[in-house]
Each structure stands twice: as C-alpha cells, then as structure tokens.
Image (cartoon, rainbow, N blue to C red):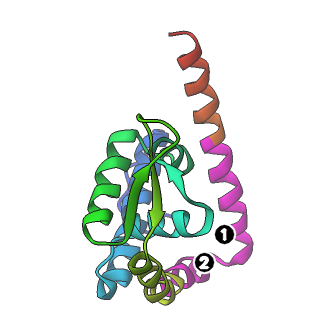
Amino acid sequence: MPTDETPDIECAVFHLRKTTRTITQLYDEVLRPTGLRSTQYSILRIVSNLGPFTVNELGTTMGMDRTTVTRNVRLLERMGHLRIEPGDDRRTRRVRLSARGRSAVEKTQPYWEQAQAILVGGLGDKRWQKLRNELTAIVNVGRKELDKRADTR
C-alpha cells in the first residue's frame, strides 16, 4: 500500500526518521499560528503536566540528549515560557513552566488537537493505538540495549 517514493530498504532508522520528519512537519505547519514548533510545545506540555524537571530528567522523559534539551530549554526560557531555577545541589537546575508558558500551552492546545486529529483520523483509532504500542516497544528495545552498553563502559 505504499503511496510515497520510499525506497524498498530494510533500514529501521531510515523509516523511523522519515516518519518522524514528515509528522513533525505536519504538526509544525498546523502549530505555525502559535509561534511554537512541535518540539517546543512538547517540552512545554510535558513540563506543564509532569514537571518540574531537572534537565537530565526532562531529557530522559523526552528521549533527548542533554545538549538538545539544554538548547531547547534555553530558547523557551528566552521566550519567557520556562523558568530555570536552582536544583537540589549546585550542579542541577530545575525547569518550571512560567505563567507565559502556561498561557502558551493553553493557546496551542487546540492547534495540537487539530494536528492530532489529522493523524489519528487518517489512521483510525485502532491503528493509532496499535502504532503507539509498537512505538513504545521500539523505544524499550533501544533503551534496554543502550542501558546495557552504558553498563559495560
């Protein structure tokens, strides 16, 4: 049922990254009127729902490396959406949502819901739930192997 011009190759990272880039472009386009990109909204929403976090905790939760998280957090701080505060010791910082960030999450939510409806509507609820479960399994395989490799260093 392929409708795109994807080469017939058996490379998981190629297919996952192509999918991620395409869906990120869709969400970014739908979120454009808000001034936030999908990655920025994801960080704000995670911090809003589950935070505050240290930068390391946020990276682990989002599956992002520390450098990428730090860059995005600093940008969102400059935009006034996040506050970075001292952590439990001198080496850590806690990331909190500001009032402006809370407002941005509320303003962006309907646009995110629109993008989500496009994706889930195109797949159907059952396929979407199955895909979510499969994506979680893929993350777990990767995380388990990375943890194992980190233990042997």
Q: Indicate the secondary structure of the residue bearing disc 1.
A: helix
Question: In the rendered view, would you say 18 is above or below 36?
Answer: above
Locate the N terminus by quadrant: bottom right
Left or right? Give the position of 79 relative to 122.
left
Q: Is residue 152 above or below residue 148?
A: above
Q: Nearer the viewer, residue 98 or 55?
A: 98
> To which residue does mark 2 refer?
120
Task: Estimate the x, y position of residue 10 in percent, counting from the top left.
Answer: 48, 39
Residue contact between numbered discs 1 and 2, judged by CB atoms under 8 Å: yes
Residue visible at 50% across and 87% down? 114
Does label 1 or label 2 sit earlier along the sequence? 2
The image quadrant that residue 66 belongs to is top left
Q: Is residue 25 left or right of residue 147?
A: left
Q: Residue at x 53, y 52 (%)?
A: 53
- Residue 138 visible in image: yes
- Magenta span covers which residues? 114-139
Q: Which image quadrant is residue 74 in?
A: bottom left
Of all residues, the one furthest to the top in this rendering is 152
Q: Is 132 colored magenta in this rendering?
A: yes
Spatial separation of the CA atoms under disc 1 and disc 2: 6 Å
From the image, tell me which residue sits under label 1.
128
Amino acid type of the residue that numbered disc 1 sits on in the rendered structure: Trp
Q: Assess disc 2: are there few (<14), some (14-19) or many (≥20) residues with their C-alpha within 10 Å of its C-alpha.
A: some
Image disc number at residue 2 = none
Q: Residue at x 60, y 43 (%)?
A: 139
Count every numbered label the image shows and give the total.
2
Q: For the residue marked with disc 2, what is the amino acid?
A: Val
